[in-house]
Amino acid sequence: MRRKTVQKDAIKNAFLMESRPLRVDEILQMGRKVVKSLNQATVYRNLKCLVEIGWLRIINHPDLGIFYERAGKEHHHYFHCHACDRLFEIPGCALHEKEFVPPGFVTERHQVFLFGICSACGRT
């Protein structure tokens, strides 16, 4: 049985406050607003637990490594702002992989990342 802790609640709250995928450093910074003593080891331990129980899922960014996002969302893609290094969800899927996959190949899954500057960074 997994126990409920204030640290885990602070980590979960970070994902409830932000609707985009988060890096460990972002989770730690947001969690420390609630639990001042929160440390990186505790964040990693709780993220592992939240992934294991299916509350979070891991996203492997091709350049920046691992991000985490709430599980259970509809299929979507990602926009990476290279100015602020945040990752944003792009709803839906415009990729029709069956049109691009060679005959005899079977697509099991895909992830698409677009790169550029987000609206907030574009205003500065």
Image: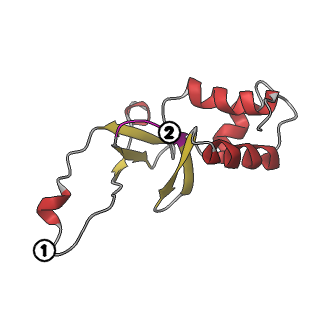
Q: Residue at x 69, y 33 (%)?
A: 11
Q: Residues within 10 Å of mark 2 (few under 14, many from 20)?
A: few
| x, y percent for residue 59 | 50, 52
| x, y percent for residue 65 | 55, 59
Q: Is residue 21 shown left or right of residue 122? A: right
Q: Residue furthest front?
A: 1
Task: Give 48 or 53, whichever is nearer the viewer.
Answer: 53
Q: Residue at x 34, y 58 (%)?
A: 109
> How is this picture coloured?
secondary structure
**Circle 2 sits on which residue?**
71
Q: Is residue 80 shown left or right of residue 29? A: left
Q: Is residue 102 above or below residue 63?
A: below
Q: Residues within 10 Å of mark 1 (few under 14, many from 20)?
A: few
Q: Residue furthest right?
A: 37
| x, y percent for residue 53 | 62, 42
Amino acid type assigned to the residue bearing label 2 in the image: Ala
Q: Quadrant of the N terminus?
A: top right
Of labels 1 and 2, earlier in sequence is: 2
**Circle 1 sits on which residue?**
103
Estimate the spatial distance between the alpha carbons at disc 1 and disc 2, rounded to whole Å.
32 Å
Q: Residue at x 37, y 45 (%)?
A: 79
> Does the magenta-highlighted stretch encompass residue 16?
no
Question: Is disc 2 placed on a helix, strand or loop?
Answer: loop
Res. 68 image quadrant? top right
Please give the range of residues in magenta. 69-74
Task: Give 34 or 54, whichever is nearer the viewer.
Answer: 54
Q: Is residue 12 above or below residue 44?
A: above
Q: Which mark is residue 41?
A: none
Question: Is disc 1 placed on a helix, strand or loop?
Answer: loop
Q: Residue at x 68, y 49 (%)?
A: 48
